[in-house]
Structure formats: structure tokens, C-alpha cells
Amino acid sequence: MKSYEDVYKTAGAFSWTELMTADPKAAQEFYGRLFGWKFDTMNMGQGDYHVVKTDGTAVGGIMGIPPESQGMPTAWSAYVTVADADAAVEKCKSLGGKVCAGPMDVPNVGRFAVLQDPQGAVFNVMAYSPPAN
């Protein structure tokens, strides 16, 4: 059986879930009480990012809707691990999908893009960087 960390190395695995919301504090309160989640807060420059932890394991994040995305509805999104975000973008386009954002780098995390399948479902792909030693 694979460990949880293997999802960051296994192409095609769902590896992260993220909530973008106009009210991260209210979301933390709601989900914390509902599921018993704990949060580690990191300052990301444009605002705080709240890492969701269950039983001490980071499983997702909650963040405010960025200024350039104002008007976007509050929504959860899923990340799928890929070996190469740029190659995944090109393959998505060749299969009739669209690129909504990226690819772009997340320092100390990896390279990601926001994609849309031909039926309209939006998802993220992430090529994780190897951990720094």
C-alpha cells in the first residue's frame, strides 16, 4: 500500500484540494467544527494561506479569493499530480480542453495550471518540486 506522500509523486493521482473563498476565517471555523480540521497559516505575500490538517497530515488549503479573481464564486478545486505541467497543458489543449491559467510556478511547491475539460469541468494539475534537503 502506498503512503499518503506518494500522491505527490504519482502521475494521475488526486493530490491536493483547495478552497478559494471570500471569507477564509468563516470557512476555517465551519470546516474546523464540522470535521475537526486544524490549520497552519502561512503568509503568502498577497494574503494568508491556511493549510488544512487532519490527524497531523496536510490534505488541502483554504485561501481568500485573489484580487484579480474578484467576483469568482467560492469553490473547492482539486489538484492532480503530473510529471510536467507544461506538457499536461499542451495535451489538454490537443484533447479539446482549455487553459484557464498558467502554467506558473509556486515557490517551493512546483508548477501548476488550471485547466478545463471539454465538458466544462475545471481542475488543476501540479508537477511537484522535489523536497529541499
Image: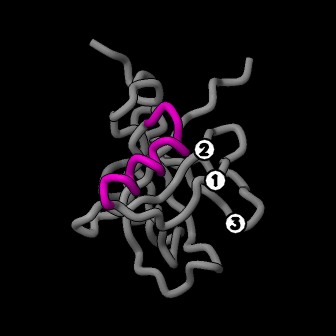
Secondary structure under tag 3 reads: loop
> Is the residue 82 above or below the residue 49 in the image?
above
Task: State the CA–CA distance, disc 1 to disc 2.
Answer: 5 Å
Tell me residue 38's x, y (percent): 48, 47
Q: Amino acid at mark 2?
A: Arg
Mark 1 or 3, which is nearer the eye? 1
Tell me which residue sits at (56%, 79%) in the image. Answer: 69
Query: Which stretch is magenta?
Result: 82-96
Q: Name the residue nearer the viewer: 124 or 65.
A: 124
The answer to whether residue 24 is left or right of residue 19 is right
Q: CA distance from mark 1 to mark 3?
A: 18 Å
Judged by depth in the image, the label closer to the viewer, 2 or 3, is 2
Q: Which residue is mark 1?
A: 104
Identify residue for label 2: 111
Q: Amino acid at mark 3?
A: Gly
Quadrant hosting residue 122: bottom left
Q: Indicate which disc, 1 or 3, sits on the residue closer to the N terminus.
A: 3
Q: Viewed as shown, does residue 103 lie left or right of 88?
A: right
User: Which residue does the numbered mark 3 point to in the structure image?
Assistant: 47
Q: Nearer the viewer, residue 2 or 122?
A: 122
Q: Is residue 83 magenta?
A: yes
Query: Which is nearer the N-term, disc 1 or disc 2?
Result: 1
